[in-house]
């Protein structure tokens, strides 16, 4: 059975102290009521070591939101996959549309990041998804397939086991517009078929595919009720513990 996951993506929010407060609140809530899914919080680099220690004895795993496409050396301001791993973080989010758009991360750069993350023992939450113009031109399948082919379909079947896919239609991220459960299910099923074509039916069945884009407690049950939607990658609603818990509860 593939894993059900609810993962937060804090983006560039929360000072260290605010992040510790939020993680502590979440840890206490989930200790009192065990979740029915894996819970991950994706945080800025500055939180990783502190939160990995704080959440060590909890059900919550920690993820970075990025890592460098170089191993080490003279790359001022960059943080390597090995450094992320050394904080105790288990995951890294790669390919988020904000990084593709604002930081010009190409499929080739993302491929290097994915390879380094896996080589350093991190699991990867790899984001794909189409823009509004691409959706209106009915190109969502072609876009998702190309993004997979460009950065992750070169992996070996063994490496693939450490990949989680997050389908995030760009037009739904932070906009309040959610894909309907039917729209999301349709493309999730397509993505799973693409995985099956490369890695086989069993591997595809074992692959966790998350939905992201204005997911909240009110729409999560319908989205997560679809057969190919295995949870969510959550931006805005991961910044307050009760909101995030409301989405985790969709798995009850
Ligand atoms: C995201 O950026 O990964 C995301 C899904 O954001 P939001 O939930 O705010 O739409």
Image: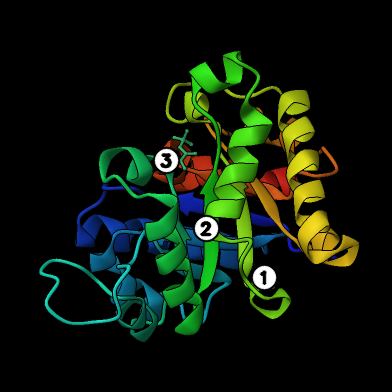
Q: Residues within 10 Å of mark 1 (few under 14, many from 20)?
A: many
Residue 8 drawn above or below residue 90: above
The residue pinned by badge 2 equals: 151
Q: Give the alpha-carbon distance from disc 2 to disc 3, as whole Å.
A: 14 Å
Q: Is mark 3 within 8 Å of ligand 1?
A: yes
Q: Residue furthest right?
A: 201
Residue 239 drawn above or below residue 169: below
**Identity of the residue drawn at 40% across and 82% down:** 88
Q: Is residue 140 left or right of residue 235?
A: right
Earlier residue among tags 1 and 2: 2
Front position in the image: 82 or 90: 82
On the image, the x and y values in percent for residue 200 come to: 85, 64
Front position in the image: 170 or 11: 170
The residue pinned by badge 1 equals: 160
Q: Is residue 76 left or right of residue 40?
A: left
**Does the residue at mark 3 contact the one at mark 1 (Cβ under 8 Å)?**
no
Q: Is residue 224 left or right of residue 96?
A: right
Residue 182 drawn above or below residue 89: above
**Where, by quadrant of the figure, is residue 94 drawn?**
bottom left
Q: Residues within 10 Å of mark 3 (few under 14, many from 20)?
A: many
Q: Residues within 10 Å of mark 2 (few under 14, many from 20)?
A: many
**Identity of the residue drawn at 85% across and 59% down:** 205
**Identity of the residue drawn at 63% across and 61% down:** 153
Q: Is mark 1 within 8 Å of ligand 1?
A: no
- Depth-wise, is mark 2 or mark 3 nearer the camera? 2
Earlier residue among tags 2 and 3: 3
**Identity of the residue drawn at 34% across and 81% down:** 87
On the image, the x and y values in percent for residue 59 come to: 58, 71
Q: Secondary structure at mark 3?
A: helix
Q: Is residue 144 left or right of residue 90?
A: right
Q: Secondary structure at mark 1?
A: helix
The residue pinned by badge 3 equals: 97
């Amino acid at each position: 059975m593939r894993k059900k996951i609810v993962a937060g993506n804090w983006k560039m929010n929360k000072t260290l102290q605010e992040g510790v407060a939020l993680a502590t609140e979440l840890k206490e809530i989930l200790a009192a009521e065990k979740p029915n899914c894996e819970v991950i919080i994706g945080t800025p680099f500055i939180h990783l070591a502190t939160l990995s220690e704080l959440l060590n004895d909890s059900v919550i795993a920690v993820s970075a939101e990025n890592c460098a496409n170089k191993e080490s050396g003279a790359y001022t301001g960059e943080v390597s996959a090995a450094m992320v791993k050394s904080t105790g973080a288990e995951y890294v989010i790669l390919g988020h549309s904000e990084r593709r758009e604002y930081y010009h991360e190409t499929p080739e750069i993302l491929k290097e990041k994915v390879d380094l993350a896996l080589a350093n023992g991190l699991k990867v939450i790899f984001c794909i998804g189409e823009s509004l113009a691409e959706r209106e031109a009915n190109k969502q399948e072609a876009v998702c397939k190309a993004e997979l082919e460009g950065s992750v379909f070169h992996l070996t079947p063994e490496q693939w086991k450490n990949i989680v896919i997050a389908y995030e239609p760009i037009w739904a991220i932070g906009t309040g517009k959610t894909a309907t459960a039917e729209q999301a299910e349709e493309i999730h099923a397509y993505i799973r078929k693409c995985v099956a074509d490369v890695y086989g039916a069993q591997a595809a069945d074992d692959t966790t595919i998350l939905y992201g884009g204005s997911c909240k407690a009110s729409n999560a049950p319908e989205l997560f009720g679809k057969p190919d939607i295995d949870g969510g990658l959550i931006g805005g609603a991961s910044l307050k513990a009760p909101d995030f818990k409301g989405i985790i509860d969709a798995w009850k």
